[in-house]
Image: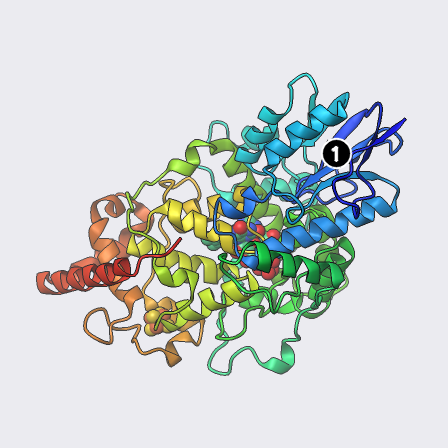
Amino acid sequence: MIIAVMEDSKKKSVARRATVRHLVVVLGDQLDRNSAAFDGFDEKTDIVWMCEAQDESTRIPVSLPRIVMFVSAMRHFRIKLEQEGIRVQYHDFSAKRMTLDRALREDIAALSPQRVILLEPGEWGIREVLRAACPPALLEERADRHFLCSHEAFEKHARGRKQLRMEFFYREMRRKHGVLLDADGEPEGGEWNYDSENRKSFGREGPGRLTMPAPAAFPPDAITRGVIDDVRRYFPENPGRVDDFDWPITREQALIALKDFIDHRLAAFGDHQDAMWAGEPWLFHSRISAALNLKLLDTKEVIDQVERAYRKGKAPLAAVEGFIRQILGWREYVRGVYWRHMPQYLERNALDAREPLPAFFWTGDTPMNCLSDCVGQTLRYGYAHHIQRLMVTGLFCLMLGVDPKEVHRWYLAVYVDALEWVELPNTLGMSQYADGGVMASKPYVATGRYIERMSNYCSGCRFDPGVSTGDKACPFTTLYWDFLQRHEKMLRANPRMGLQVRNLTRLDTDQRDAIRKQADQLRSRLRASKSKW
Ligand code: FAD
Ligand code: SF4
């Protein structure tokens, strides 16, 4: 017997049999038909459960591009499942406002499944919510094989080490998964890491439009246009713009984006992965982080395709190694750190930073050219590349002394690829040093000179990166010297900061005072225009 429980005539799939065997939960970042959640799936007795939980978009001020990314990808995935004849119990936020746990509780009560299948959620908080919403006797949690390092394997790697370092983890991963090894099982080319070849700027001429093809773009189809209309209507206060939305939101599109990157930009990725250029958000980056995080792409397939490009002579070793290190190394590593240290990790504030996030982070409206460009493109596309996130927005917050929780909320809200397991260690650890050295062996601090070297931002800016006090002073340079003074004692104990701290001795007392005063004035000014969020 089939009992209809339809709330909306459009949802023809919302029906149940008298006996539902498995209710298979598919979250917005689990859009993979080959995931462990679907192992043993029987379309005659099993139902997929999906929910566009509105609380996910309002508990932090999630930007419009990020909401569109997740919701559109979910709606496309639902259609794909239904085309296969799979029944989907789907909660659409525009039809009914639902929290994740309430929706699941109600459906478990209504459908009485024999089992609820849950692929382990990527986020600690969501795992807790879903565990609480489901009677333990019904719940079957399955490991996520999208990742190449299991929790147990990471624990084994970490146990007994005084300090974790990505580089050692990465080498183990290369050996274990047979990636970029020569016939003797040694690193291809003799070195594990070619980072020293990968830090070039573009020089005065810039990246050169002719040699930098525009990445594959995916203009919104009717479904995405519907989502865009919905988010504009339901989240009128949320930040960000969706006029330029062109991200890959299906597996087919994600594969095209990956191929396009490998064919056209991978070869130059290594050389210029740290470089920035005003008005050029993509440069030689892949734009696949969101597709990977939503599981439209498989980790190993990405690594294999990139390695194959190297074997076929399409890209140099330094570029290929540099790219693979981001995925097999950093991405897996930050996930390991996240699960090892949550939930306490979220509370860390090793530098006792208490300033509010400056209001311009929600508008891009600042005379600092670098920040205006990076925040502006973030709100417009939901994207900034790694160095923009680490050495412009992140660096400014770190040296200003912004509360790491506020910084975390911003990063989690604004990027299309933002998920807590990957965002939090990068933000709170790597960029803000709030974990006291779990992720990074020292705080990444620099004057405006670093930004000047790696971009053309400073040439159009009213500040001077070489000046630390007075009207022309670059706020990065002021805050750098202020940061070293404020944390001098702690930094002296860190051998990797020795040179930078020794440079402080070049400043006499008057210079130190003037810098402190200028930094305090900057903080007061920024505090006065407190963010509405
Ligand atoms: P590319 O530059 O082409 O790099 C290739 C891939 O490597 C990326 O797609 C990504 O999957 C992976 N990768 C690169 N660096 C990292 C890293 N540090 N950690 C994990 N994976 C990495 N990445 C996210 O996916 N989600 C986030 O929420 C996120 N938040 C960040 C916050 C801060 C403060 C910083 C410094 C970095 C953050 N990153 C995050 C990492 C990185 O900035 C993005 O993965 C990258 O910019 C995405 O663009 P892309 O796909 O063009 O990457
Ligand atoms: Fe940024 Fe300073 Fe350069 Fe201006 S001068 S773009 S504020 S680093």
Q: Is residue 300 above or below residue 163?
A: below
Q: Which residue is mark 1?
A: 37
How many other residues sit within 10 Å of disc 1, few (<14), some (14-19) or many (≥20)?
Answer: many
Q: Is residue 406 left or right of residue 100?
A: left
Which quadrant of the view contains residue 526? bottom left
Q: What residue sits 63% from the left and 76% below the top?
A: 212
Is residue 492 at least partly visible in the picture? Answer: yes
Residue sitting nearer the eye, 274 or 108: 108
Q: Is residue 221 above or below residue 344?
A: below
Residue sitting nearer the eye, 13 or 273: 13
Which quadrant holds the N terminus? top right
Q: Is residue 338 left or right of residue 392?
A: right
Is residue 192 at least partly visible in the picture? Answer: no
For label 1, the SS is helix
Q: What residue sits 28% from the left and 51% below the top?
A: 355
Query: Horizontal and vertical percent for residue 102?
Result: 61, 32
Q: Is residue 398 left or right of residue 425?
A: left
Q: Is residue 480 left or right of residue 269?
A: left
Query: Horizontal and vertical percent for residue 89?
Result: 75, 37
Q: Quadrant of ligand 2?
A: bottom left
Q: Amino acid at mark 1?
A: Ala
Residue sitting nearer the eye, 67 or 522: 67
Q: What residue sits 31% from the left and 78% below the top?
A: 462
Query: Horizontal and vertical percent for residue 219?
Result: 70, 68
Looking at the image, the residue that sits furthest to the left is 510
